[in-house]
Image (tube, rainbow, N blue to C red):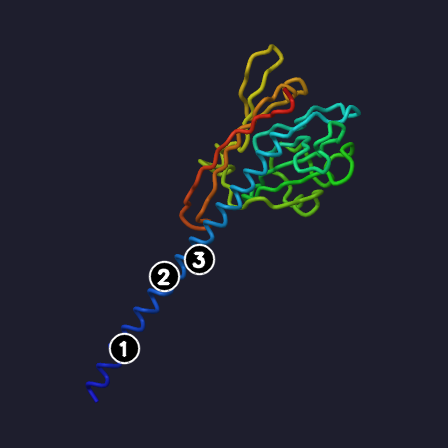
Amino acid sequence: MVELLVAMSISLVITAMILVSWFALSKSYANTSRRERANDSTRLALARMVREIRDVEQPPASSTEVAIVRARPFYIEAYTTFNKSGNQFADVAPRLVLYRLYSNGELWRFQDMDSPANGIQGVDDAAESGFDLSERTTGEGAQLMASYVTNETTPSAANPTPLFAYIYYNSDGTLAHSHDVRGISDRAGIRAVEINVLLDLNPGKSPVHTHLRTTAQLRNTR
């Protein structure tokens, strides 16, 4: 009887060790998979932004705007022909597209689905900050591009890291660099957009940041 109890105790200890190891490995695999998905989706979003910004074009002649309508630290709105049917023809009107980073770390894309003259419905494209989260459901052509983006809280909420920066020629012809470009003449002079994404690969726990950075050269507005 004693030997049986000893054998059962040893078996229970070994079983417990196996289960603990299995749960630890499963958790590690789940965390790794989540990190890879977050990283992959953000890289795809970054690649899409770059392609659309590269194909930025001047709006139809009836518009009083220029190719880049808004050039702000956490959102950009522009006219682009990327991936639009018939974009090989010069007379095809570009579509209006907006990328915006929200306070919950989500990066969303919106687009004008009908006429380039009426703008993107359901989105306040003149907002300075504190963007309304309800835009994610009311915004025209809303599409979630990435989650866990921490630019607004890194290194702190008081000193965030801008998502976009702009290289442009200002009114006196000198080359300038800014995270916030206002005025039609300065926005018309934008020649490149720097995209700087900080991504938390371990959300809800001790942050594990990765840094994705690239520059999109505007090739159609020179």
Q: Residue furthest bottom?
A: 1
Mark 3, other Cα within 10 Å: few <14 / some 14–19 / many ≥20: few
In the displayed image of the protein, which residue is found farthest to the front? Answer: 88
The three-letter code of the residue at mark 1 reads Ser
Instruction: Say which quadrant the C terminus sits in.
Output: top right
- Mark 3 or mark 1, earlier in chain: 1
**What residue type is disc 3 on?**
Ala
Decide which of tag 1 and tag 2 comes sooner along the chain: 1
Give, as a three-letter code, the residue at label 2: Ala
Up-down: is 149 above or below 50? below
The x and y percentages for residue 64 are: 76, 23
**78 or 57: nearer the eye?**
57
| Residue at the image point whose x is 53% and y is 33% from the top | 163
Circle 1 Cα neighbour tier, 10 Å, few/some/many (<14 / 14–19 / ≥20): few
Q: Relative to residue 70, is residue 174 depicted above or below?
A: above
Give the residue pinned by disc 2: 24
Spatial CA distance of label 3 from label 2 is: 10 Å
Using residue 159 as the reference point, say whether residue 168 is left or right of it. right
Q: Quadrant of residue 99?
A: top right
Kindly identify which numbered label has been placed on residue 218: none
Q: Residue at x 57, y 33 (%)?
A: 50
Mark 3 lies on residue: 30
Residue labelled with disc 1: 11
Helix, strand or loop under label 2: helix
- Residue 126 point in image, percent of width and height: 68, 31
Alpha carbon separation for disc pair 3 and 1: 28 Å
